[in-house]
Amino acid sequence: MRVIVQREPEDGMKTGLELLCVMRAVLKKIKRRVLVGDKVVVGSIDWVERRGVIENVFQRSSEIVDPPVANVDRLLVLFSMEQPPVEPFMLTRFLVEAESYRIPLTLALNKTELVDEETLFAWKNRLRSWGYEPVFCSVETKNGLDSLAFYLRDLTTVIVGPSGVGKSSLINVLRSDHRATDSLEGDNLFDPISGSKWFEDQRVGEVSTRSGRGKHTTRHVSLLPLLGGGYVADTPGFNQPSLLKVTKQSLAQAFPEIRKMLKDSEPAKCSFNDCLHLGEPGCIVKGDWERYPYYFQLLDEIRIREEFQLRTFGTKREGDVRYKVGDMGVQQAEPRLEPKKHRRQSRKRINQSLLDELDELEDDDDSLDLENDPIIRAIENENQ
Ligand SMILES: Nc1nc2c(ncn2[C@@H]2O[C@H](COP(=O)(O)OP(=O)(O)OP(=O)(O)O)[C@@H](O)[C@H]2O)c(=O)[nH]1
Ligand SMILES: [Mg+2]
Ligand SMILES: [Zn+2]
């Protein structure tokens, strides 16, 4: 693993160097994972050969699952106006996934030069009604890149979004010619080990003309130092965030529209404590907003997933709540009480058995696209 050792002397100039490290055997034994973005203790350093041993991992301030990155300060959800065009439901999926991590998020729309002013204006108003202030940008014309650079400065940011929207292109431009206007020359100077890809450009793909989509050019998660300070992780563009951390109960909190309605009506509340806001009498959430059908659709998808998990394993996943049927058939949420340690183990077992099960499934159903299935991918990431 590559570890950056950073030094911040009085003159404010950040310098650092990169070490190639292995993990201490005992960490492997206790299956402690080191994620991209982790802060670690390095020992047995050979400064000449630039080698070291990772002795321990610091506690994480945040952790996202898909892609697996630790200590993320901000999520940048990037879509493009055209090639590929914004699909509102897919955008909603990405936003819901991003909201579920409870990390500050920025929504940006790239390739603005491909559409006219009216279209931009219409999208701006539309997204405002969703509760977002989007940043419009174009890697091509460099429009809006200053505001983005400002959002990313000194933070660890993960950029997510569908394939082909320009995530890698944006990172390249933020890491190269943009520096001239935005930060001091030579700032944040890292001395990389040989063979390091940190100063190379990210590979940028062609958008396939037939589908208007990218061709999954970026395959791995990597954390790249920004010249003005901070890090950014490029991710492969997947079109289906897994929503594995989202439960029926937490879904509403991932919609700013619902959050606002609930807040505005305070102190009045929905008559049921665990209201799923399906428009029953006594529910504060009304149906006169654009994404209400998406909320329904996602709720349904999550319900089906939870039922599948319940049927298959007799339990749901971490972060879930159990339901018991209370008076008059009303479902009541109940937090799961097992200690964390056990939960971790059993989750791993569950994941493994789910994978085994799907392996078997695959034998008699080869239409199942395991490699690209978002849930399988996230589970595999968790198991690694
Ligand atoms: N017209 C236009 N094209 C752009 C812009 N930004 C990026 N592109 C092009 O969009 C294509 C896809 O860009 P990438 O940066 O590879 O997209 P990505 O989001 O990293 O895609 P994956 O790695 O597949 O997830 C490339 O051909 C870029 O040159 C822009 O602002 N305008
Ligand atoms: Mg890419
Ligand atoms: Zn309600």
Image: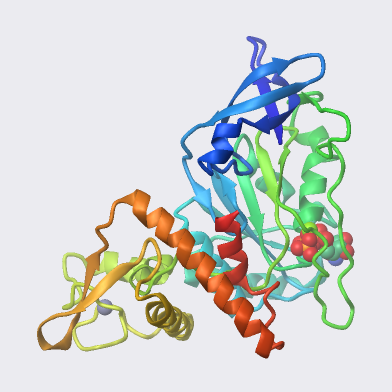
Question: How many marks overall?
Answer: 0
The answer to whether residue 30 is left or right of residue 330 is: right
Report the residue at 87% width, 41% height from top: 200
| Residue 55 in the image, given as x and y percentages of width and height | 57, 26
Report the residue at 56% width, 64% height from top: 379
The answer to whether residue 348 is left or right of residue 261 is: right
Q: In the depicted view, which residue is nearer to us: 145 or 214?
A: 214
Note whether 55 is above or below 284 in the view shown.
above
| Residue 104 in the image, given as x and y percentages of width and height | 50, 50
Note whether 327 is above or below 15 in the view shown.
below
| Residue located farthest toward the top when viewing the structure as drawn | 10
The answer to whether residue 35 is left or right of residue 340 is: right
Report the residue at 71% width, 36% height from top: 1
Report the residue at 59% width, 41% height from top: 34
User: Ligand 1 sits in which quadrant?
Assistant: bottom right
| Residue 150 in the image, given as x and y percentages of width and height | 64, 41
Residue 243 seen in render: no
Here the colouring is: rainbow
Residue 367 seen in render: yes
Q: In the depicted view, which residue is nearer to us: 230 or 16?
A: 16
Note whether 334 is above or below 177 in the view shown.
below
Note whether 60 is above or below 317 in the view shown.
above
Q: In the depicted view, which residue is nearer to us: 80 or 365?
A: 365
